[in-house]
Image (cartoon, rainbow, N blue to C red):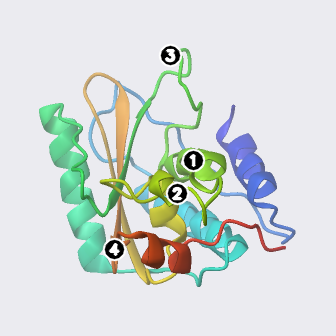
Amino acid sequence: MSSTLLSFALLALIGCSCSTTPFILEACSGAKPGIPADIVAQRGAALFYGNEYRRRHGAQPLTVDPALETEAQKQAEYMALTGTFLHGAYSADNLARIPCDSEIKQRFPTEPTIPGAVFRWTFELPFRCKNLAVNQSVLVGDSIASFSRMVWKATEQVGFGASVTADGYIIVVAKYFPPAGKGPDVTVRNVHCEIVE
């Protein structure tokens, strides 16, 4: 899928009826490890798509926090450099590791970009919102799912980071503040499952 098609696919998924020019992004390349050359455009596209997705789930738009962005970038670079991809049980971050090579089979095929990671995190919606009021343990185990972190109503700020590994993967980190909480009551208040038109 080309990057332009990804932009249209994301807009279709979130149901954006707005008239906008899609972001033209570069897919990562294992031949170019390190920070993506178009990281500013990728961050802008991720914020745009993420905020439209939040709107459709009853949450206010996020703003970029430079300190969170710096932390997310450092974490992405560290994981790409060391080959580690760790997600703590109580992490407040969303992480994605996407192969640059589109021939590698993926469970949730997405473009190897920051907005591609945002798109990937939306795939948790059907599972995470199933029987929210009844089967709350689905949402509030030892960690909060990526979908829940994305649409958490109390969250106000975000920072995105990305780095390409030497073996051809892009590592994407999204840090949120305030972070998603834990517990059935706070989850039900902060995660709106129905899509608002």
The residue identified by callout 1 is: 124
Return the disc, 1 or 3, that comes first in the chain's sequence: 3
Q: Is mark 2 in CB contact (under 8 Å) with mark 4?
A: no
Instruction: Name above or below for residue 116 compared with residue 84.
Output: below
Relative depth, front residue between 13 and 188:
188
Q: Amino acid at mark 2?
A: Phe
Return the disc, 2 or 1, that comes first in the chain's sequence: 1
Query: Dot 3, crowdedness within 10 Å: few (<14), some or many (≥20)?
Result: few
Query: Dot 2, crowdedness within 10 Å: few (<14), some or many (≥20)?
Result: many
Q: Secondary structure at mark 2?
A: helix
The residue identified by callout 2 is: 147
Of the numbered discs in the image, which one, if any, rests on residue 16?
none
Return the disc, 3 or 2, that comes first in the chain's sequence: 3
The residue identified by callout 3 is: 104
Instruction: Name above or below for residue 20 compared with residue 129.
Output: below
Task: Give residue 169's position: percent from left, percent from top.
Answer: 36, 30
